Amino acid sequence: MKVDYDEKSVRITLRPGEYVEVSWNGRWFARRVEGWRVGEVILKDDRILIPFETAKVVDVKDVIGWDSNELSLDGFSPRVGFIKVDLRPLQSMKIVYERKKRIAQSKGLKYVYEKYNARERNREKDFINKLASGLTKLFPNSVHVFEDLEKENLVSRREPKGRRKRNARTPWELIQGKASERAVIERVPPENTSRTCPRCGYVVKTRVGRVFRCPRCGLELDRQKVAAVNIYLRYLRMRGFPHSYDPERVKGELWVGVALRGRSPVIWAPMKGALRAVKPREEGLISSYIKPNEA
């Protein structure tokens, strides 16, 4: 492979005397990748993919651990506190289109089925784009730490089919991939994130109920928050920092909602004080508010 950055073209040798040349000069993304380097080109049957890469120095101001759940993304950082991103609009949208596609399929309407399938993909993509853009604006210069897994793999096949299906509705890999285009993403091992006490390190044998109770130190906290704290701590341990943190010192929780329709998201600065949780109504708006810590 030979790259000509002046002519904005890539020449790929397939075999001696046979090559293909592709140019990105004049394409819609040409100005966006100005000064970037061409990565490893991927040859498909019907197209050629040219990845671009660039080195960017990020002044990291915060680290946020994210626990991926069926109806929410639950985050934690000592600077912000607990964070809950509401994914119910995405789940509701997918449930509606699943029903529409099922009816179309039962009637043998392939064209209608494909139309609903395309609409679902577009709305899902729009939601994820707004979510990733909103989080990077709300938490600039932050490292976002996720579990290194596909969430539906955590659900045993012995569990009801409906539960496995609900977990499969949320595209965790797409969310993480889109976030990685705008921010620094790290991944940590997922084992026992919701069964380990973040204060003393004790690992409970079973994962029952929504509330985590540590028999050693007495910590009681929502299990999703426990997982977010442990994901944050695992990243710190990878960097040689202390192993524990007391989440009971956190006094507030930041809620983030993403509307399915509308213009680009607008970020509101977190409000101070205890406010009632209200579902966002404004179109195209990311809203945030703080409510008292229920722990």
Image (cartoon, grey):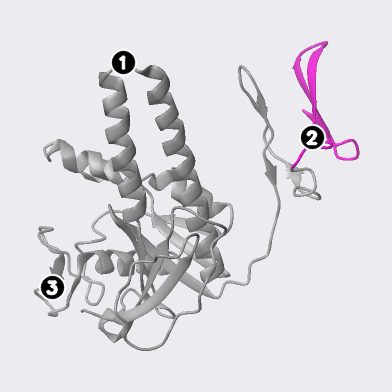
Image quarter (top left, top right, bottom left or bottom right) of the N terminus: top right
Q: Residues within 10 Å of mark 2 (few under 14, many from 20)?
A: some
At x 24% / y 43%, what residue is drawn? 166
Give the residue number, with chain letter if any, for mark 3: 214
Amino acid type shown at disc 2: Trp
Q: Nearer the viewer, mark 3 or mark 2?
A: 2
Tell me if 139 is positioned left or right of 47 in this view. left
Image quarter (top left, top right, bottom left or bottom right) of the C terminus: bottom left
Residue 116: image x %, image y %?
A: 40, 31
Tell me if 212 is positioned left or right of 71 in this view. left
- In the image, the segment drawn in magenta is 1-28
Q: Which mark is residue 2?
A: none
Residue 119: image x %, image y %?
A: 45, 36
Q: Residues within 10 Å of mark 3 (few under 14, many from 20)?
A: many
Alpha carbon separation for disc pair 3 and 2? 57 Å
Q: Which mark is residue 108?
A: 1
Amino acid type shown at disc 1: Gly
Q: Which mark is residue 24?
A: 2
Residue 201: image x %, image y %?
A: 22, 71
Q: Is residue 142 above or below residue 112?
A: below
Label 2, secondary structure: give it: loop
At x 39% / y 77%, what residue is drawn? 289
